[in-house]
Amino acid sequence: MKKIGLLLFANFVIVAAIAQRQEDTDSEHGFKRENVFWGGGVVLGIGSVNTNLGINPEIGYSLNNILDVGVALNINYFSERADNTFNDNIRTRSFHFGGGPFARCYVSKTLFLQGQAEANSIKLSYKYSDGSVNSVTAKSTSMLVGVGYMQRNVGEGGFYTVVLVDIAKSPTSPYTSSNGTLLPVIRVGYNFYLSPKKK
């Protein structure tokens, strides 16, 4: 949890440092209030025996027409039903909370690539075929990468959809199944931009 806090603190310090450099709103350089966006989305990941549901609030800044940077939080619930061939008939449930910085690079007006580093705190519960239950807590770091779609105009809100996978492949990653299979994470959300500062 300490790593999560440090990561979030570092990101907010960066955003605050940018804000301190605010210049006259008529200037083309410096911090622009109308480039700040906030919002987020819902998480949906579905496999043949597993489900991943969650929310992802985020805040960020559009540096230009190509690059967005920011920080996102995540609160997720993951379940994997017991299956003889897939997971030795062990039911798994987990709840994880975390966050980290992200960057989106727009390769066209509507298509973007996203990378997001995450640190997560996870509570896991295993139920075995004999009815016994084992609960554990774990820490995990992830590196989510993927591709998304958004009708983007800086200063105007919009819906987005992104599909991500965790390329770090940590054994405790909330984005892999119990046998190590990568689970695609589908996020759908909406971002709002702040209004320009009144003169």
Image (spheres, rainbow, N blue to C red):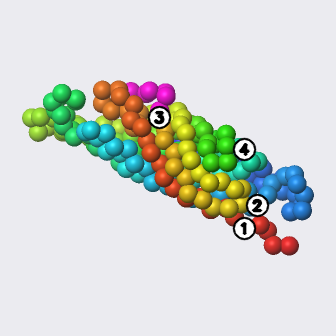
Alpha carbons under labels 2 and 3: distance apart: 32 Å
- Kind of residue sitting beneath label 3: Val
In depth, the one of 197 and 11 nearer the eye is 197
**Earlier-in-chain disc, 2 versus 3:** 2
**Earlier-in-chain disc, 1 versus 3:** 3
User: Callout 3: helix, strand or loop?
Assistant: strand
User: Callout 4: helix, strand or loop?
Assistant: loop
Q: What mark, if any, has residue 66 been given in the picture?
A: 4
In the rendered image, residue 149, in percent from the top left (x then y), is placed at: 56, 47
- Kind of residue sitting beneath label 4: Ile
Please name the residue that numbered disc 3 is placed on. 165
In depth, the one of 71 and 167 nearer the eye is 167
User: Magenta region, mostly helix, strand or loop?
Assistant: loop
Q: Which residues are magenta?
A: 166-172
Please name the residue that numbered disc 1 is placed on. 195
In the rendered image, residue 141, in percent from the top left (x then y), is placed at: 49, 33
Please name the residue that numbered disc 2 is placed on. 33
Question: In terms of image quadrants, where is residue 195?
Answer: bottom right
In the rendered image, residue 116, in percent from the top left (x then y), is placed at: 57, 39
- Would residue 80 be found to the left or right of residue 148 on screen? left
Q: What mark, if any, has residue 25 been given in the picture?
A: none
Alpha carbons under labels 1 and 2: distance apart: 7 Å
